[in-house]
Amino acid sequence: KLQFLYFIGCTGSMPTKALIFDVGGVIVASPVVRLREYSVKLGLRPEQVGVAMGQTEAFHKLEKGEIDPGQFAELVVSQMGNLQNKVNGEELMRCMTGGTVHMDLLTAIAQIKKEKGVKTGIITNNFRTKEMFHLVEVLTPYFDDIVESYAVGMRKPDPKIFKLSAERLDVAPEDCVFIDDLGQNLKAAKQTGMHTIKVTNNDTISLIQELGRILDWDPKSAMYPPAVNATGVPEQHKLNTTTLLAYLHQQLPHIVSKSESISRLEFFGTGKSNPTFYIRLANTGRELVLRKQPPGELLKGAHSMEREYLTMNRLSKLSDVPAPTTHLLCTDKSIVGTDFFLMDYMPGRMWTKGGAVIKTLPKWHFTDAYVDAVRTLAKLHKLPYERMGFKAKTGSGCYFAKTIDTWERQYQGGVKQGAPRVEPFEKLAVELKKALKVVAFDRNMKTLTHGDYKLDNMIMHPIEPRVVALLDFELSSVGHPFSDLGYFMMWHRLPTIINGMGSPDKIVSEQQITQRYAEVTGFPALAQRDLEFLVSFSMFKLAGIAHGVWSRALRGTVSNVSKGEETDRMGAGVTTLSSNGLKNLKKYDAKM
């Protein structure tokens, strides 16, 4: 349980010019826990491995950059006395990396910099590994300066490293507050004139509160930050929380107690299909996500909560494809007005602004994340879907042909409800049916498909370039795996009006993506000509989705879209998608 925080050397608010943070145990979960678990695994006292390692010359040399991680792994074991026959140097390295980043603290730091004008820095005893490099890349935007022990040849608790940090921030030590979880480091910082805060048991909540007190800053908005782009709940999506909590207590008493209340309720501003809410429970701090159907008249088969819930439920329980844990599906419309399901909130990064994300990340980081997204898609397509309870829809026929027919029907349904006709969309449907007759790949392949596979529908690890959760399985079905691959590739062909990301060759080439996908799945490699068909098919499908949202927006049932310029842009997006699909099919014809 998180508890205790001590503020040493200060009382009340003070004119602080800089906040300097340790990393492990403050910004990132302390490696001590992993070292203790490793020690117990070896049959030793919990603290035995960590204490013995910390006393070695090898560990000190590693943090001062005098030896590299490979040399450390070899040298440290020989210096651990009677433990040298039990410990493994590489496992020790793994224990010291990979801790969870405290995103609530980073949110608070960003707000403090903006609102109070305080400089921020880091002093970290670290070493040269890929994991540490990832971490520093993620932390850099939040801090004015980062002092890494291996880079400067000194480590905490050497007082000179504290003086160096203050000097690089261009402030006097007396105007700095240093935050750490180790008493010896805090003592050394105090000797230089710095004020100090000690964090115990990774208690970032108490730390944020203390920072608010000494800086005369309101920490409320940073205490329980919801996911990216969450906002206040729009009027048309207000929930009766009393009814909801009573129902959840009845169905999930192990999660929602009778006395439970909601301390924070937010609406996710991204996406325009199914309204999605962030919920934080007051008593336990449990974070949940509620996803529901939109209000108003819905097209037949659209916005199926049952399909999405069952898919995510089976994936989280029966596979290694990353998906949030689901808890409940409710079809009783008296609770929140429509069908809904409840799942765990997954912390991490959501890349929801298309090409803009490329500019905020080093190329290698985005490349690694992109490759992992392809790997994750391949894992989804290799699942034994029938054994997991997924069934193909009855009736024969090609998946692509049936999908084209489905979106034509949805489009006509939208037109009947008042949405304008889009001539390029209708023409694209005709041309796709012609092109489908001559594709080279096997049209009868079947796997579990996502249906809307793109970066927007993934949560990335807070630091590492890898996928930790797939979201939005509303369109999931047993279908053709290449439909997902083409849809994923499509986003690099789209103009910025519809959130395109630009040429994939700036990150990783299309050929690399298709080759990597073929390697992991074992499926035949795609010919470039067939990829052109798949991208055009995906543009048609996305145009169909967009037309449906546009239709609902014109009727006033889309929460974050108002009539006028926004709906005009949506209509233009449908036309642009369809027109680009037609242009892309010309490339397909040219390659015949």
Image (tube, helix red, strand yellow):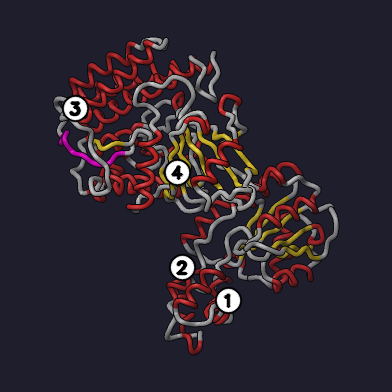
The magenta span reads: 441-449
Q: Where in the figure is residue 331, as x and y percent of width and height? A: 43, 34
Q: Amino acid at mark 3?
A: Lys
Sooner in the amino-acid sequence: mark 4 or mark 2: 2
Mark 2 vs mark 3, foreground winner is: 2
Task: Tell me the distance, in whole angstroms, between the alpha carbons under discs 1 and 2.
Answer: 17 Å
Q: Residue at x 41, y 47 (%)?
A: 323
User: Where does the C terminus fall, quadrant-wise?
Assistant: top left
Q: Are marks 4 and 1 in contact (CB under 8 Å)?
A: no
Residue highlighted by disc 1: 60
| Image mark for residue 591 | 3
Q: Amino acid at mark 2?
A: Arg
Instruction: Tell me the SS state at disc 1.
Output: helix
Instruction: Tell me the SS state at disc 2.
Output: helix
Task: Tell me the distance, in whole angstroms, between the alpha carbons under discs 4 and 2.
Answer: 36 Å
Task: Tell me the distance, in whole angstroms, between the alpha carbons under discs 1 and 3.
Answer: 62 Å
Residue highlighted by disc 4: 328
Task: Tell me the distance, in whole angstroms, between the alpha carbons under discs 2 and 3.
Answer: 50 Å
Tell me: residue 404, above or below residue 481.
Answer: above
Residue highlighted by disc 2: 94
Q: Amino acid at mark 4?
A: Leu
Task: Tell me the distance, in whole angstroms, between the alpha carbons under discs 4 and 3.
Answer: 49 Å
